[in-house]
Image (cartoon, rainbow, N blue to C red):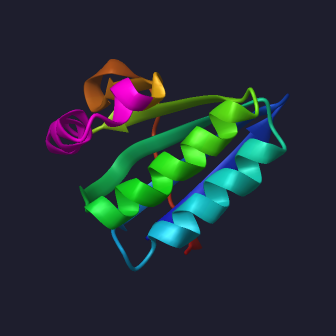
Amino acid sequence: MDYRATETNGQATLFFDGELDMAVGDRVGELLQQYGTRNESVTVDFQGVSFVDSSGIGSLFFTTKELLALGKKVEIVNVREEILDILSVLGFTEALGISVAKAAETGFDAYASDCI
């Protein structure tokens, strides 16, 4: 999975591209933790994410939960319909109470430049 990150005025945005699975789930969690800890809010852009599995979602879930406990704001945007369905079935958004937006609902664009 590739990623790119931006940080401005306490707001980080992580742009992911590829598959969020067991092979990269821990690294995605580490990146979210790193950027989320030093910023007040973090947006995770899923525009380029083509697949997720339970291991990848697990890492994302637990890291998001930790950030929320620290008072951070976490938002996931540009989620493909099929991935949104998986997140919904697993109760991801309900359990965390975070905002998750479909790909057509935001204006973010993803450009990957770094590799996980």
Foreground pick, 77 / 68: 68
**Residue 22 visible in the displayed image:** yes
Q: How many marks?
A: 0
Q: Residue at x 45, y 68 (%)?
A: 25
Residue 30 included in the magenta stretch of the image: no
Foreground pick, 87 / 104: 87
Is 41 left, or right, of 89 in this rendering? right
Q: Residue at x 40, y 57 (%)?
A: 58
| Quarter assignment of residue 93 | top left
**Residue 113 visible in the displayed image:** no
- Percent x, y of residue 71: 74, 26
Q: Residue at x 52, y 41 (%)?
A: 44
Magenta stretch: helix, strand or loop mostly: helix
Task: Look at the picture and state if 111 lies above or below 93.
Answer: below
Q: Residue at x 37, y 54 (%)?
A: 57
Tell me the quadrant of the picture where the N terminus can be found: bottom left
Which region is colored magenta? Answer: 80-95
- Percent x, y of residue 80: 23, 40
Is 99 left, or right, of 103 in this rendering? right
Residue 86 included in the magenta stretch of the image: yes
| Quarter assignment of residue 69 | top right
Task: Look at the picture and state if 62 lies above or below 104.
Answer: below
- Percent x, y of residue 62: 52, 50
